[in-house]
Amino acid sequence: MTTLQGKNIYLRALEPEDLEFIFAIENDESIWEFSNTQTPYSRFLIRQYLENAHQDIYEAKQLRLAICKNDDFKAIGLIDLFEYDPRNNRAGIGIIIKNEGNRNQGVGSQALELLINYSFKQLNLNQLFANINPENEASITLFTNFGFEKSGIKKQWNLIDGVYKDEAMFQLINHQL
């Protein structure tokens, strides 16, 4: 599957063996503000999710892929397409690299490039969007390096630790259509 193969990483479908990895990410309160999560997930619910992960993006309206180093099957991160809208050919995109030791090594850039190319060439999407906290400079840099442009600010959009915070919307239009 060369479409989702990068120089140092590859993207793959989720497997039952990813249960503990996903459980750890979904229950890490330090990242809940990025995923709009407010409650923990049980292993039971994640197991059910993984059992239905075989649905394609057209059925599930989302696609979650594991990010793995080329020499290993173990996931180091996740990259998602969400809110897939087939009528308007768009989807949101999100990414997380779990351990800080795997960050700032080009993993996120490679994963994002792979999913952008897949989204535009295989899924024929017209655009991708990302919702980013304006204080998250690393994410803003990552997405703008791939041509995402800030299209607006949603004022006081998310309530985080008792404080309403803004959320910026970034868009990437597929100019190859």
Image (cartoon, rainbow, N blue to C red):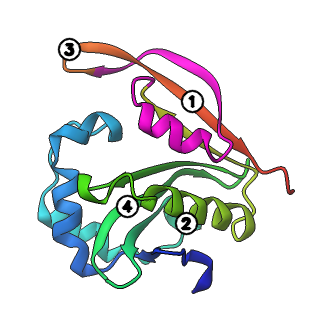
Range covered by the magenta-colored residues? 134-159
Q: Is residue 78 magenta?
A: no
Residue 118 location, x and y as percent? 64, 67
Q: Are marks 1 and 4 in contact (CB under 8 Å)?
A: no
**Neighbour class for label 1 at 10 Å: few (<14), some, many (≥20)?**
some
Instruction: Please tell me whether residue 101 is drawn above or below residue 118 in the rendered image.
Output: above
What residue is pinned by disc 4? 78
**Neighbour class for label 2 at 10 Å: few (<14), some, many (≥20)?**
some
Disc 4 or disc 2, which is closer to the eye?
A: 4
What residue is pinned by disc 3? 162
What residue is pinned by disc 2? 57
Instruction: Please tell me whether residue 165 is drawn above or below residue 67 in the rendered image.
Output: above
Instruction: Please tell me whether residue 85 is drawn above or below residue 74 in the rendered image.
Output: above
Along the polypeptide, which appears first: circle 4 or circle 2? 2
Disc 1 or disc 2, which is closer to the eye?
A: 1
| Residue at 61%, 39% in the rendered image | 144
| Residue at 54%, 57% in the rendered image | 112
Taking the view exactly as shown, the residue that stands out farthest to the front is 105
What residue is pinned by disc 1? 169
How far is the residue under mark 4 from the one under mark 2? Answer: 16 Å
How far is the residue under mark 1 from the one under mark 2? Answer: 22 Å
